[in-house]
Amino acid sequence: MTDHKPRYKAYHHPAGGWGAAGATAKVLLEQSVVTKGSRALLAMNQPGGFKCPSCAFPDPDCKKTLEFCENGAKALAFEATKRRVTREFFASHTVSELMEKSDYWLEMQGRLTEPMRYDAVSDRYVPCEWDEAFAMIGDHLRALESPHHAEFYTSGRTPNEAAFLYSIFVRAFGTNNFPDCSNMCHEPTSRGLPPSIGVGKGTVVMEDFEHAEAIFVIGQNTGTNSPRMMTNLVEARKRGVPIVAVNPMPERALIRFTEPQDVIQMATFGSTPIASEFVHIRIGGDLALFKGMMKVMFEREAQGETVLDHDFIREHTVGFDLVRQDVLAQSWRDIVEISGVEEAQIRRCAEIYMRSRATMICYGMGLTQHQEGSRLLQQVVNLLLIKGNFGKPGAGIAPIRGHSNVQGDRTVGIDEKPTDDYLDRVRDVFGFEPPRGHGHHTVETVEAMQNGTAKVFIGMGGNFVRAVPDTERSYAAMRKLALTVGINTKLNRGHLVHGRNALILPVVARSEAIYTLAGEQFVTIEDSMSTVTASRGVLAPASPDLLPEVEIVCRMARATLPDSKIPWESYIEDYSLIRDKIADVYPEIYSDFSERIKRPQGFHLDVPPRRLVWPTPNGKANFLLMPGLEVNAPVSDPAMLRLATVRSHDQFNTTIYSYNDRYRGVYNDRMVLFMNADDRAARGLASGARIALETISDDGVRRRVEGLTVLDYPMPRGAVAGYYPELNPLLPLEYYDKISGTPAAKSIPVRVVA
């Protein structure tokens, strides 16, 4: 794994600051892009430049010359790297040899440079022409007995234009099989929020941070996964806004943070304390916390106080009384036991919430990746509704999505469960009848591979096989396919775990310029707060043999659907024509797209709950009942621990930038298990012991990961954490939220084996 000896040393400095500045400089040096990378960083997240290829947090009004974070700089440096994966590289390595390499090693080889085809005889990838690659894709797709035997994956980095055309191509082909990266993270947002408020998105915008009187950050490691959000939290704390951080793991950035762009703080080694209240919750204890807070408010109302917004509840909502009855039926003993939080602290959190006239609740995968993740988010909405925290400045719900444009892809059609209204508009605009039946999400896609009904897999970006659960079963399922296609910038595990035939198609990166016969083109991105902005790359492509995603989609469509009346060739040359079609299919939110996108700051897509309009069947916001306090199925094994898989600070999704996790004090190692010292001692283990983890399940499949080093960490009793994707083998494919299909990666039942 590494030539350096693992070491573990607690990190006591503030997050951000000189540590972040040093890490940024180091990665630019390592990738040999100091000059080029620095120039590109000046254009990242700026008007006329390109959007960060990392997280989906919005850009501010560009008041700063440098509007990027440490992890954004890492993403850019690895994208702009001088290292190249050439035909000579593939000639020197068999796929079997590459499988023995680590994910980090694969990432460090650099940018893909030309299309490659797998040759089974030599067990190597060999060069192929673009026309040959598209012909192979078309031949395989047309040879299928049913369009539903193909799976079309989308990564969140795919821009709106390519994602929209991908959705049209695949539906013209005849299926709604659209597994995408949202299925594995924020799908409970997309599926859980519409029954409550009518939309599957957040309702806040950046300006709301300036007006909020309380901010709750729940199940989200802001300093690593959305570092630019720390600026908003710092400014809020300086105004005296209480910030309540709820997480099983104390995260450094939510304790104390230094803004790298604050000259005075940097010069004086200063910092800002962030969380005014840290709630050290048990894994899966969030529902009990929410109901405990509501119980406090209902009790205060019973004592004669007015703490709820009764006018809002009466005018805008349905179902309040049933939720109130359920909450009051929960005992304080059960609430405290299941949440792991003392009653006094729950009451303090409720007091903060009651005093605030405008509250934002921000959340991440700590809420979504449970067996009842979708319904859990509906309880977050319940909490907001009782105080009328929608439709006013500083209030609302804020899913802090991970991948740049993962929300935009869903908006423009990457959806395995499309509505009839949307399909009608596609039919009217493009002149074909799209399929009406629901397609596959990620888990269903792997199941289709396992049972042999899936034959072809096309991955528009991402590293599907490394991201999905149940690694051994998923690898075996992928290898059953007739064809796998990886459309990527970098080499990854997905190119090595492939079907009988396989293609690697290298793509122009977000930071790189796109020129066609019609001139320079740009793409558009939707951030996690529903603002759409233009993205123009500024660097030269890594190789002359790369193609933009839009052209790859159009040429796949042309090869697969030779009789199609859709003018794919014109879309290759002029992206404004694609935006015109997006506006035709989505007239309510994308009308006059081509003009509005000319604004330097882009434009905001309408989110009706901001206007107190509820696009639900009954036209109201709905209090939705979730009885009890548990969000995961109970496990009777007394040795059971709940495992949460997490990312390190030097990681973005499945991309590993190094073996370090600075804020958690881990260096040169990823095979670690963060564990409460009392839980460790109760099992007779010494700190630093080497152990194995096994999944507790009743499906007869043995899931085990060995070689983990136990590290004492302030976890709640009964909770452990370790890195994704190394611990994905422990997550059963069937262990997911049935509403959204999202794997329950934050609550895997495991036992420690010495």
Image (spheres, grey):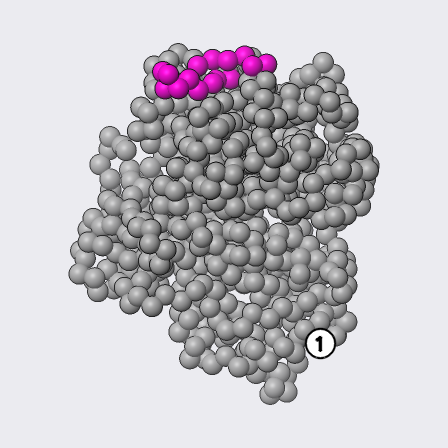
Query: Image height check: is 117 above or below 470?
Result: above
Q: With 298 as the anchor, is 218 left or right in this view? A: left
Q: Nearer the viewer, residue 598 or 69?
A: 598
Residue 307, image x and y in percent? Answer: 64, 77
Residue 661, image x and y in percent? Answer: 35, 43
| Whether residue 696 can be seen here | yes
Tell me which amino acid carries mark 1: His
Q: Nearer the viewer, residue 409 or 116?
A: 116
- The magenta region covers 115-132
Q: Which residue is mark 1?
A: 310
Q: Is residue 129 part of the magenta span, yes or no?
A: yes
| Whether residue 512 can be seen here | no
Packing grade of label 1 (10 A; few <14, some 14-19, many >=20) is some
Q: With 206 as the anchor, is 482 left or right in this view? A: left
Quadrant, the C terminus: bottom left
Query: Image height check: is 719 above or below 575?
Result: below
Q: How many marks?
A: 1
Label 1 secondary element: helix
Q: Is residue 714 part of the magenta span, yes or no?
A: no
